Image (spheres, coloured by chain):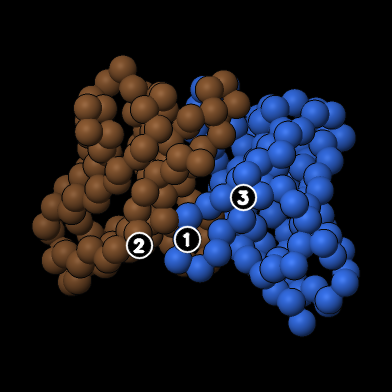
């Protein structure tokens, strides 16, 4: 079936730099997208979400951009800190009101002090 | 997430045994989900439940079973029919149109 595509890449940044993590999705009917952060041995932690009627949403130090034309989602982290080091997953809801999420494989973010 | 408790944190299974993973929540959320995560992979949906006494198969339900007798509890049984059960199992809950929130998982290994 359709899935959010993301081979597990690694992004390495210096502390204080901005980070951009990208995600391509394939289901044009998906109406809701979420970014999660997962630290080793723990469950995913919600970061930010966006609905398909928006193209940008900002949180504290994070921004999510949605480009429906090319089916692309990105997560921007401003002033990246060592505590931001983790695996980041994007997820799409293509299950309507059931909110069945399809997850990408994740990006490992490493922040160097 | 403090409102979602998964136990045990680590679980070992012998060949041919069924094991049950616990997921309890005190968030009063209607929907609950079970996912499986393999190393270097994203999460894959096993089963989900929108309300008490009702549940549906996800993408990889074979070899698993669930029950939803109480709103607070959604136990997952890994049966002997699941030939590759070693994985990290995650439980999530959701309320309305809000995002899913996750517990801290159970790591299952085969002896």
Q: Where is the C terminus of chain B found, in terms of image quarters?
A: bottom right
Q: A18 or B111: which is nearer to us?
A: B111
- The chain painted brown is A
Please tell me how crowded label 3 is: few (under 14), some (14-19), or many (20+) other residues with Cα within 10 Å: many
Chain where mark 2 sits: A
What whole-number distance in Å separates the C-alpha atoms at marks 2 and 3? 18 Å
Chain where mark 1 sits: B
Q: Do the residues labelled 1 and 2 touch (CB within 8 Å)?
A: yes
Kind of element beneath mark 2: loop
- Residue visible at 35% across and 59% down in the picture: A7
B91 sits left or right of A100 in the view? right
Please tell me how crowded label 2 is: few (under 14), some (14-19), or many (20+) other residues with Cα within 10 Å: some
What whole-number distance in Å separates the C-alpha atoms at marks 1 and 2? 8 Å
Q: B95 or A11: which is nearer to us?
A: A11
- Residue visible at 29% across and 46% down in the picture: A23
Task: Check chain identity for marks 1 and 2: say if they share one.
Answer: no
Q: Which residue in the protein does label 1 denote? A: B41
Q: Are marks 1 and 3 in contact (CB under 8 Å)?
A: no
A32 sits left or right of A21 in the view? right
A106 sits left or right of B76 in the view? left
- Residue visible at 63% across and 44% down in the picture: B59
B103 sits left or right of B84 in the view? left
- In the image, residue B30 above or below residue B1: above
Chain B colour in the picture: blue
- In the image, residue A84 above or below residue B23: below
Kind of element beneath mark 1: loop
Chain where mark 3 sits: B
Q: Which residue in the protein does label 2 denote? A: A8
Kind of element beneath mark 3: strand
Residue B20: percent from the left, percent from the top?
82, 58
Q: Can residue A82 be seen in this view?
A: no
Q: Which residue in the protein does label 3 denote? A: B35
């Amino acid at each position: 079936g359709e899935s959010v595509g993301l081979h597990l890449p690694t992004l390495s940044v210096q502390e204080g730099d901005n980070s951009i993590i990208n995600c391509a999705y394939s289901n044009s009917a998906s109406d809701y997208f979420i970014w999660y952060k997962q630290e080793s041995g723990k469950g995913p932690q919600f970061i930010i979400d966006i609905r398909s009627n928006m193209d940008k949403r900002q949180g504290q130090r994070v921004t999510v951009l949605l480009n429906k034309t090319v089916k692309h989602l990105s997560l921007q982290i401003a002033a990246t800190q060592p505590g931001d080091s983790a695996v980041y997953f994007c997820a799409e809801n293509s299950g309507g009101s059931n909110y069945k999420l399809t997850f990408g494989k994740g990006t490992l973010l490493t922040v160097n002090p | 997430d403090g409102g979602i408790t998964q136990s045990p944190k680590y679980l070992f299974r012998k060949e041919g045994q069924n094991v049950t993973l616990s997921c309890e929540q005190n968030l009063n959320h209607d929907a609950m989900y079970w996912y499986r995560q393999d190393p270097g992979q994203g999460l894959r949906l096993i089963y989900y439940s929108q309300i008490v006494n009702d549940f549906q198969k996800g993408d990889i339900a074979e070899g698993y079973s669930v029950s939803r007798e109480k709103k607070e509890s959604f136990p997952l049984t890994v049966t002997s029919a699941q030939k590759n059960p070693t994985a990290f199992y995650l439980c999530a809950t959701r309320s309305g149109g809000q995002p899913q929130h996750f517990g801290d998982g159970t790591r299952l290994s085969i002896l």
